[in-house]
Amino acid sequence: MLLGPKLDADIYSSIRDLARKFANEVIRPRAEELDRDELFPIEIFTQMAELGLFGVTVPDELGGSGLDCLAYAIVMEELSRGYASVADQCGLVELIGTLLTKHGTPDQQQAYLPEILGFKKKVAYGITEAEGGSDVAGIRSTAARTESGWLLNGSKLWINNAPVADIGFVLARTDPDQGHRGMSIFIVDLHAKGVSRSPKEHKMGQRSSQVGALFFDDVVIPENALLGELDRGFYIMMGVLEKGRLGIGSLSVGIAQAGLEAALEYAKVRKQFGKPLAENQGLQWMLADMAKEITAARALVQQAALKLDHGAPATAASSMAKCFASDTAVAQTANAVQIFGGSGYIRGFEVERLYRDAKITQIYEGTNQIQRTIIARDLLKNGIR
């Protein structure tokens, strides 16, 4: 099924130029510092909000840019070329914006979207637990109804923004006897009594992203904190994961593209045996393979984006895009390190950071083993679409 873009080509070109310019001029010059010191660059995120790089697909009447998933994929790739941790924040805000757009009440949209899209409030997306990661149905956090609202108990693990977030969108069991059919989403003030956090984790890659645990001990939340329908939280969360996987696929392409660009430049200037590396046929083949794999990954990502934009079934497409693109990012940044030789293994060289940043893309938003299971199930049920 061939689908075309829904917006004018000039719009995609403009948003790509905007995101690329910002990545080159603002993000990339600070990427080494942000990675080394594990900094959370509020000033960069504030500038992104001012440029409309948060909430790309959120309707303009709700404060977003009113664009589509293809534009979102383009923005994620370009920002990730600068530094994946920055792009990751864009993806997180996009998912929360999508949740509020699709399932929030008008009051919830008015209360939260302006502050989230303007980066006045930082958000966390609370799904993963010690026994519930790829198996979302395995979560144990509970929300029990009270006379005035709900009482939240439990914990969340490896949550992006947990050390710094102001607002959490938390999945909890509201009917423990119904399995995944008894879960709901709550908007939680993370400064409320009973909420605590672990120190931030020190990660292998994407070190500027702040990741940690959240703990809920008899946290009182009001009735209007429920997002969407009661006991439908699992399905609501699953409904935005297609866009989440599209985002990670796009981010992966950006990492891989940055690795290719660095390797190309190095191959032109580095000399061995009296001539540039780029004149070595074996290395030329490596560069060619890198380029074709990255181009294929980008095509899969954009195909998934187009399906989402046209309302076509996109479960398998988004899983293919995420799985293939993240595998490509790991493989091709490894090739970039190889082309740099010993220099590529040294801190301070961009390709060393890119290689570390790439690995997590095979794990979060559903491991690539889970993605293969999703693809196979869809293939066996629906055939090739």
Image (tube, rainbow, N blue to C red):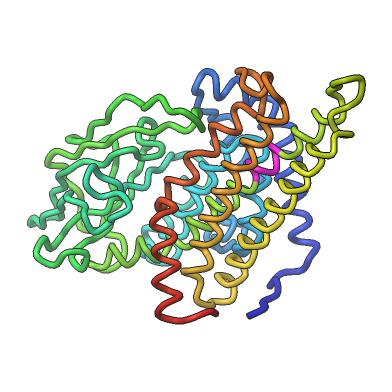
Residue 163 lies in the magenta stretch: no
Direction right: furthest residue: 274
Left or right, 382 with respect to 50, comes to left
Q: Which residue is drawn at 19% across and 40% down?
A: 216
Using the image, determine if residue 89 lies above or below residue 278.
Answer: below
Observer-nearest of 133 and 149: 133
- To which quarter of the image does residue 227 belong? bottom left
The reply to whether residue 100 is visible in this rendering is: no
Quadrant that contains the C terminus: bottom right
Left or right, 44 with respect to 145, comes to right
Q: Where does the image place residue 263, in percent across and percent down from the top left? A: 75, 33
- To which quarter of the image does residue 90 belong? top right
The reply to whether residue 184 is visible in this rendering is: yes
Q: Is the magenta stretch mostly helix, strand or loop?
A: helix
Q: Residue at x 43, y 39 (%)?
A: 122
Q: Where does the image place residue 312, in percent across and percent down from the top left? A: 54, 78
Observer-nearest of 122 and 348: 348
In magenta, the rendered stretch is 254-259
